[in-house]
Image (tube, grey):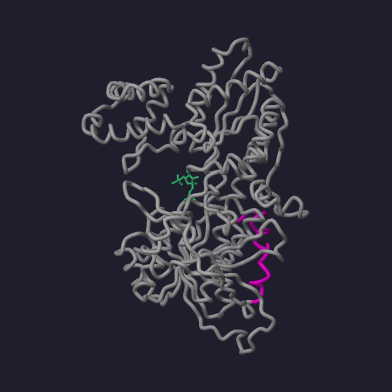
Amino acid sequence: MKISPLQKARAAYAPKLPVALRNTAKVKVIAGEPTTAVSDVEKIKELFPTTFGSPVLTFEQKADACTCACGCDAPAINVGVILSGGQAPGGHNVIAGLFDGIKSINKNSKLYGFLKGPDGLVKNEVMELTSDIIDAYRNTGGFDMIGSGRTKLETEEQFEKGYQHCKALGISALVIIGGDDSNTNACLLAEYYKGKNIPIQVVGCPKTIDGDLKNEWIETSFGFDTACRVYSELIGNIGRDANSAKKYWHFIKLMGRSASHIALECGLQTQANITIISEEVEEKKMTLDEVVTYMANIVAARSAAGNNFGVALIPEGLIEFIPEIKVLIAELNDLLAKEADAFGKLTDAEAKIEFVKARLASETGKVFASLPTGIQAQLCNDRDPHGNVQVSLIETEKMLAEMVKSKLKTIDGYKGKFAAQVHFFGYEGRCAAPSNFDADYCYSLGYNAAALIGAGVTGYMSSVRNMTKSSDEWIAGGIPITMMMNMERRHGHDKPVIKKALVRLDGAPFKYFASVREKWAVETSYVYPGPIQYFGPSEVCDLVTETLTLEKA
Ligand code: FBP
């Protein structure tokens, strides 16, 4: 198979490891105090009777290694690994780290990859991951080694099937690489197996480009760093083009299903003129018109200074955070579910829009009427199998560009020219070759997951922290997943879930951004981050996100 010169050279990169994991035979486990949950403690305790309260674990190196023939008398272990959810740069390195980690425990250990996500476990689609396979994927982007999927592991039937399939292969531990929901389900699986004395450990690894799986113990989810660098490179290039031609406003929607971490990080890296943060819009209860007015005023102010160009960053999840649109979407979901038959008979967009207009309540009807026709049609059309509007398919960037254009006509004294270009950056960043940060972090998370398996624990998430410091100071260990949980209302039921980390308006990254955004809006102070550097001096290769740097400052 032909590979690019970069891929070939990058395969030789040796990711860094925390000191505690550098000699497996010397790993010492330090257990902290019993833990609790984020909130709803009694309920979480009741739902996770055997895994609740486990201590935080930290690995250290003891002075002496064991002296047996293989360097360690730990038995060989067979481990299964699953990639769950959307792709994120570094997934292959988690698997490579896990492979090297279990081999360092005992060279006869085996790693099995369940194919196409959690479905592979349920349907027994699996392959052994040999060193040849692992070596071909070291430091590469993508999840194509074993594939991924969005099936949720949540029913007893799935858990039992998974058990039978693991038993047949002698698998005694599963590593689930996923976001908040997948790790919540990893914990349910751990609880089920432990509660039934089924000898299968379950360990999670924090993945998602969205950056919304983080807390005191999980500093960041992997993939966020690389994805943001790819988007920021492109935004920087666009900023430079805008500043060269001086004739376009670029409206750029950035992936991130609900949280705005990606938009904030890219705004910080590139100093774009406008960065909308959904969490702020919700907090201030801004209407769509207020968001549009805010943007149009910046366009007008720049125009008054002779700058009829700019760059605006829009988080993918924005539409769901605007309170009035949230209400509209909820009403639309109900309406179209109730009137599914009559609505289903309509074929053209115009008829669908009229159908909806005639039935919406008066306030929501006004909001609907204020939207551009294309967006009205998208709100009527794009529904997922659960009957919900698929917000990621709504072209918010286009909607805002159109609405800003109209709004400018109402601004006193505005005489500028407004021409917009729209973009959506999402999939471009999800499978990029991992930056040094993600390559190191992911390899360490996988190696650390092996150490957690070696320590015999279950229901833990692999944690490597202190990542803004040199690898000699990274702290490796395990965090009980129940510790990150609270109860939330999902699809009409109260469920235990890992608390999703939205952008905190009292957090250092947002506060810094808020202190400089007015200047960035009016002045043209773009930063051009350029492409991720894989070779060269540490100051360009070993960067840490602005978000993490500000959070740890
Ligand atoms: P995960 O939360 O599974 O990591 O996925 C994140 C994400 O990339 C979002 O940013 C985006 O909204 C969504 O996946 C897109 O999903 P799909 O790949 O199914 O189109």
Q: Position of residue 475 (x, y in %)?
A: 64, 65
Q: Residue furthest right?
A: 537
Whether the magenta-drawn stretch holds residue 509 is answered as no
Name the one closer to the observer, 79 or 28: 28
Q: In the image, 483: left or right of 490?
A: right
Q: Where residue 54 appears, x then y in whole percent?
A: 48, 69
Would you say 480 lies left or right of 467 here?
left
- Residue 85 as seen in the image, left or right of residue 216: left
At which x and y percent is residue 197?
36, 76
Q: Is residue 8 magenta?
A: yes
Residue lying at 64% horizontally and 43% vertically, measured from the top left: 509
Q: Is residue 495 left or right of residue 10?
A: left
Q: Please, is residue 74 above or below residue 184 in the view?
A: below
Q: Residue at x 39, y 56 (%)?
A: 496
Measured as percent of width and height from the top left, residue 99 is found at 55, 70
**Which sits in the foreground, 33 or 62?**
33
- Could you tell me which residue is drawn at 49 percent across and 61 percent down? 483
* Majority secondary structure in the magenta region: loop
Residue depicted at 62% across the width and 12% down the height = 414
Residue 422's place in the image compared with 233, above or below, is above
Which corner quadrant holds the N terminus?
bottom right
Q: Which residues are magenta?
A: 1-23
